[in-house]
Amino acid sequence: MKRTLGTCYYPEHWPEEIWADDARRMVEAGLTWVRIGEFSWSRLEPTPGDLQWEWLDRAIETLGAAGLRVVLGTPTATPPRWMINKHPDMLAVDAHGQPRKFGSRRHYCFSHLGYREEGRRIARLMAERYGRNPYIGAWQTDNEYGCHDTTVSYSNAARDGFRIWLAERYGDIHRLNSVWGNIFWSMEYCAFDEVDLPNLTVTEPNPAHVQDFRRYSSDMVVLFNKVQVEEIKACTSAPISHNYMGRITDFDHFAVGTDLDIATWDSYPLGFLEDRVGADAAHQRAYARQGDPDFQAFHHDLYRAVGHGRWWVMEQQPGPVNWAPYNPSPLAGMVRLWTWEAFAHGAEAVCYFRWRQAPFAQEQMHAGLLRPDRQDAPAIHEAREVATELSGAPDVQFHKAPVALIFDYDADWAWTTQPHGAGLSYFSLVFDHYKALRRAGLSVDILPPDHEDFAGYRLVLAPGIMCLRDGLRQALNDAKGHVLYGPRTGARDEGFAIPVPLPPAIKGLDVTVSRVESLRPDMPVTLTDGGAVTGYLEELEGSADVLMQTSQNLPVAMATDNQIYCGAWLDAAGLDVMVALLCDRAGVERQQMPEGVRTRRTATEEFWFNHTTQSADTPFGALPPAGVLRRVL
Ligand code: GAL
């Protein structure tokens, strides 16, 4: 498969007279793909049942005839105003019980059966009309499920759906009472119809109740997507994708991905650095025009797994965006670097958002490849440069990395449901491990928690999986490579209770977590070999070998053969020590990266990226700021 470029285009935003010229210029810039349609419902169906396809027919014809391949999106992220008249109770409801209003986007509740059927209907109508259109190369369902905090809704539809879901899961209300531990505070129910949603309670609700509601909410996203996929699949053999986001963990992306052919995601490195990386002010200042060196790569590796190997960047930041606290311009060269970085991690395509900056509505301060006056914006020159470079580059190839890191959405909800200390998030824990691996120059595969064959991986990291299911437990225990568990591995059972025997209960590893504590950020516990524990620490008992300890000689990490447990959240220096130790034990070669420099290896290529504003040393010579080095092996 060739590596390709594309862009996101909204023909409904522009006079029809300029579509052909836009298409010609896209081709001239070296672009292959153009994604359209995902917000266009009010023009496709201005009033209920009045379908207006002709403009879209002409748009697809114009783009396709110019030589572009179209990705067609279903428009369900933006239900038109009349939809609210038709289904007044379809709006999502926030945790305070307030319906979220019309006037932006994503204003629907995933549990609403009527709206789900509207999604099915419009997907079917689009697929019937365009399923065999030769210019449509791929499909996209909706856009960015979960964005703007929209996965969890406390609506009546959600309440009714949750009750049915619980009845199916537990069968008998007494079983639910027992699994949740509802005898505590006399919270027992007599019937499933008495169970309400876990918001607006006087103090914290039962964590088992919350965790099940998170699981239910995720299942509703899976279902909402699945009905659209069924309709599209019936009419076409083109691949179907969904376009995911950065650091959105409210639904199980692996479960959605099971029904799809390709995973795509939206990479906004500068917006993310300000908005969701979670870095300190000094790091934000140092990388303000380049973005965090690991955040995009982490998601590239994650979405490679969600897409079963097939993934794209559907929206690549091309200049300043509009939505972060501060929105600087990228350093010259970064758009090219971000594009190559995605290809280094296995992307099939990178599409820039958006073709032309819109001079109206919410995103008028968001750059595009063109300015509002149709002149070139700076990013288009870098896109052209990549297009030229791509002509001689090898095709996309899958290559197993030496290290695997497991990501479990259920664990993320569990950490959020009962964090025990402010700021303790599963995403951050896994991301901290990822960063340490990348600082050691390692290429990483992120894997789902139902992965059951670790053959070929020298190292497997599984931090923080609070509910460790039997299949994964066994597979990790059977792995030939070295396995790092903890902290909080197996700390809760399926019903959110502490299991006995106490965690982590790993076969062949005599370690027991006898007590846990969370720590203020200003009370780090230092380690004898460098670094410190921050935020969270477990007291470990047992006869396994001590690998790491605090300055007071308390064990922090213990091991027997290839099974290793770490009962602490280590800071960056501590994680560097841990990764070095793991690599030595597992015989994995590592090379500590200079600040802001990252490398990745595939079967045929080796890449080096300089995310800093200074030139940086690599084994192959100096890399300029925003520099990319690609070696064919
Ligand atoms: C994405 C979204 C786009 C656009 C973009 C702005 O999250 O999919 O529609 O809003 O952000 O950066």
Image (tube, rainbow, N blue to C red):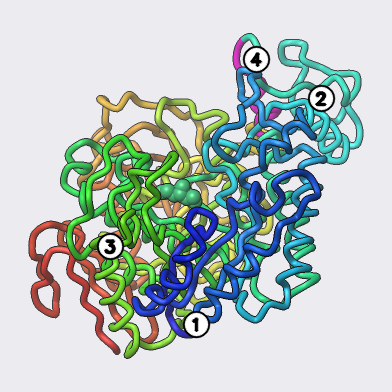
Question: Can you tell which quarter of the image residue 362 is in?
Answer: top left
Residue at coordinates 68% horizontally, 29% vertically from top-left? 208
Please, is residue 605 above or below residue 13 in the view? below
Question: Residue 540's spot in the image, x, y percent?
Answer: 44, 38
Please, is residue 488 above or below residue 101 in the view? below
Q: CA distance from mark 2 to mark 3?
A: 64 Å
Question: Residue 94's spot in the image, x, y percent?
Answer: 61, 25
Are circles 3 and 4 on residues that touch, CB within 8 Å?
no
- Indicate if the residue with disc 4 has its beta carbon within 8 Å of ligand 1: no
- Of marks 3 and 4, which one's residue comes earlier in the chain? 4
The image's mark for residue 177 is 2
Q: CA distance from mark 1 to mark 2?
A: 61 Å
Q: CA distance from mark 4 to mark 2?
A: 20 Å
Instruction: Give the labeled residue for mark 1.
Output: 67
Instruction: Give the labeled residue for mark 4.
Output: 200
Secondary element under disc 4, as helix, strand or loop, is loop
Secondary element under disc 1, as helix, strand or loop, is loop
Secondary element under disc 3, as helix, strand or loop, is loop
- Of marks 1 and 2, which one's residue comes earlier in the chain? 1
Q: Amino acid at mark 3?
A: Gln
- Of marks 2 and 3, which one's residue comes earlier in the chain? 2
The image's mark for residue 375 is 3
Residues rendered magenta in the picture: 203-211
